[in-house]
Image (cartoon, helix red, strand yellow):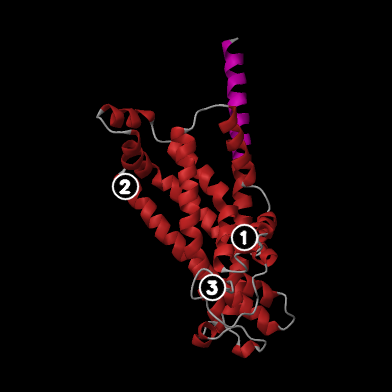
Amino acid sequence: MQLIDQRKVDAKLSGRLSKNSIIKFIFLICTLIGLVVLALLLFDIFRKGAGYLTPTFFQNFSSSTPSKAGIKGALIGTLWMMMTIAPIAVVLGVGTAIYMEEYSKDNWFTRFIRVNISNLAGVPSVVFGLLGLTLFVRGAGIENLSLGKSVLAASLTMALMILPVIIVSSQEAIRAVPGAIREASLGLGGTKWQTITNVVLPASIPGILTGTILALSRALGETAPLVVIGIPTIFLKTPDGIMDRFQALPMQIYTWAKLPKAEFQNLSSAGIIVLLIILIAMNSIAIFIRNKYQKKY
């Protein structure tokens, strides 16, 4: 009987091992397929666009002539927009997460808010574009509140879009800090705010930065909200402030990509390369800061 039972156990273990091997193999194949497709897309983009990354491409504004077209206005406008989005979204997102985790009471109202914040993270970006068009561009019908098609209006729209991602990721990072650390800080005489600023936030910065990187990366490449609020595709001027009109790089790429001439398709590939470089630079800075805090805490 013991021999038979042992054989049954061995058979079950071998069956589980074979299932695990099959699952691992399937996941490996899926990963390889994704990497191959991504590599082919990047190869095609760099093949078409690398030759157009000339000084003229960065010095000229958009033009109907491919040889004279550039991304000066779109690049500077995008940098203005991202520099405006980042402080708005990070301050509001992290501040909301701190309040929800450290100060708010656990009742039906706060649970209702948490569920709705999580649901907002999955809302299509075009809906936020419509919201931004109504609230910020048109000022909800009140002329004095209208921001027009300015950098600030677009930044507020994008900030609303990425806020749920930053809030949820920041909440998870703050929640992951052990309660014993908080209790030790309070036991040594620290106030609630001192505990948050000196203990909780530094320990949760790696997780907060991860969510912020993902959110800002989404804002950098989104086109639908900009189309809805009416950001121009051709604008031969750079903004001097957040209340000025501007041109955005995703809109410029979108415009070039839908034009029939092959030269414009190549220009759109060059614009994508520039967008990728900006994205990699942003992520590299954030990852450096995150790793620094991970080593410290």
Name the one closer to the observer, 22 or 78: 78
Secondary structure category for the residue under label 1: helix
Q: Main secondary structure of the magenta part?
A: helix
Q: Position of residue 73 (x, y in %)?
A: 55, 79
Amino acid type shown at disc 1: Phe
Q: CA distance from mark 3 to mark 2?
A: 36 Å
Q: Residue at x 68, y 67 (%)?
A: 227
Q: Residue at x 60, y 54 (%)?
A: 161
Secondary structure category for the residue under label 3: helix
Amino acid type shown at disc 3: Gly
Quarter-of-image position of residue 9: top right
Q: CA distance from mark 1 to mark 2?
A: 42 Å
Asked if residue 222 can be seen in this view, the reply is: no
Residue 254 falls inside the magenta stretch: no
Q: Which residues are magenta?
A: 2-21
Q: Which residue is mark 2?
A: 295
Q: Nearer the viewer, mark 3 or mark 1?
A: 1
Give the crowd class for mark 2: few <14, some 14-19, many >=20 residues within 10 Å. few
Residue 15 falls inside the magenta stretch: yes
Residue 160, which numbered label? none
Residue 136, which numbered label? 1
Asked if residue 117 can be seen in this view, the reply is: yes
- Horizontal relation, residue 186 to residue 18: left or right: left
Quadrant where the image shows the C terminus = top left
- The first of marks 3 and 1 along the sequence is 3
Give the crowd class for mark 1: few <14, some 14-19, many >=20 residues within 10 Å. many
- The first of marks 3 and 2 along the sequence is 3
